[in-house]
Amino acid sequence: TASQRLVDGVSKRDRRSGRAAAVNIIPTTTSVAKTSWEIFPGLEGRLAGISYRIPTSDSSVIELTFRSERDTSINEIDTLIKKASETYLRGYLGYTNEELVSTDFINDPCSAVYDSASTIRSNLRDEKRLFRLISWHDNEWGYANRIVDLIRYLQLHY
């Protein structure tokens, strides 16, 4: 963000925000969970998040850890997400099983690209419903594409 420093210095916000952004991974807060609750009230109290400021150009990653309500498998999760990416979420949700890195997602128009190669199930004893998955996104280009979608929607409906 624009308030991040390129060299270590003082920040009014907190000590971490004053550290050199080009060479550090900086944990910070995010409003994603609260915003999600406003859009999906059923998620209130069931979703939390943290953000990391990382020295990369444009693209970023989202890590989601969740406990499924029933027994399932990585294959079932992959199949469900792949189907959504090819049908009703086409253009918004992408899918890859390639071992890619952040720069591979620069200029991708999707809001998120699910990385099936990175999905894991917990190996904790008696815990077979806990999963961790990641998705990638170009936080500038993906956002710009959603603004274009909104403008098109408004043109059609108003």
Image (cartoon, rainbow, N blue to C red):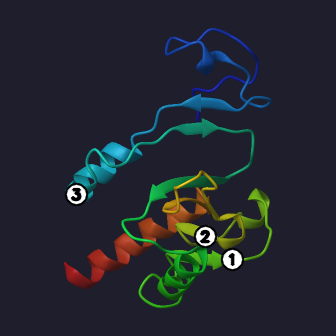
The foreground one among 73 and 90 is 73
Q: Quadrant of the C terminus?
A: bottom left
Query: Residue at coordinates 77% horizontally, 31% vertically from top-left?
Result: 22
Asked if the residue under mark 1 is in contact with the one under mark 2, i.e. CB atoms within 8 Å, the reply is yes
Residue that badge 1 annotates: 96
Position in image of residue 130 (x %, y %): 51, 57
The quarter holding residue 150 reads: bottom left
Identified by mark 3, the residue type is Gly
Residue in view at x 68 percent, y 67 percent: 107
Q: Nearer the viewer, mark 3 or mark 1?
A: 3
Farthest-out residue, bottom: 87
Taking 138 as reference, is 18 above or below it?
above
Q: Which residue is mark 2?
A: 113
Q: Which mark is residue 2?
A: none
What residue would you read off at disc 3? 42
Q: Earlier in the sequence, mark 3 or mark 2?
A: 3
Q: CA distance from mark 3 to mark 1?
A: 29 Å
